[in-house]
Amino acid sequence: NVMDKKTFQELQAACLGVCYEVLPAGEQKVLEDNGTWGVLDLENNAPFAFMLTVKALVFNVADFFGGATAEMMATSFRDLFPLQ
């Protein structure tokens, strides 16, 4: 099945709503509670926003899958998104 846009946006909001950019003045939420982007110019960088979404998702579900499955997921996504 294909995920519809509304479901993806809800998943992305759940993932990015708990992510922060660390700045000299303190932490800045990546996605604000009202749905606006908190990181400068992220709304114009869809590949980076998607990469952050996937990395946050993998980070939060890896323990659920455990062991080899979690490592396989992490490796697969590292191959897709080599930026660290």
Image (cartoon, rainbow, N blue to C red):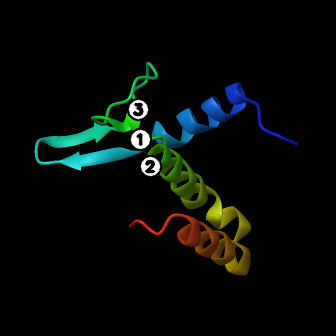
Amino acid bearing label 3? Glu
Residue located beneath label 3 in the image? 43
Residue beneath the point at 34% across and 44% down = 20
In the picture shown, does residue 40 fall above or below 19?
above
Which residue occupies 31% across, 35% down? 41
The answer to which image quadrant residue 62 occupies is: bottom right
Instruction: Name the quadrant of the C terminus.
Output: bottom left
Task: Give the x, y percent position of residue 65.
Answer: 72, 67
Residue shown at the point (59%, 52%) measured from the top left = 57
Residue 48's disc is: 2
User: Which residue, as the protein is rendered here, is positioned at the far bottom?
Assistant: 68
65, 47: nearer the viewer:
47
Give yes or no for contact between labels 3 and 1 (Cβ–Cβ under 8 Å): yes
Task: Give how far across and how far down residue 73 sits, in percent.
Answer: 66, 69
Marks 3/1: CA–CA distance: 6 Å
> Is the C-beta separation of discs 3 and 2 under 8 Å?
no
- Along the polypeptide, which appears first: circle 3 or circle 2? 3
Q: Amino acid at mark 2?
A: Phe
Of the pair 8 and 79, the residue shown nearer to us: 79
- Say whether marks 2 and 1 touch (CB < 8 Å): yes
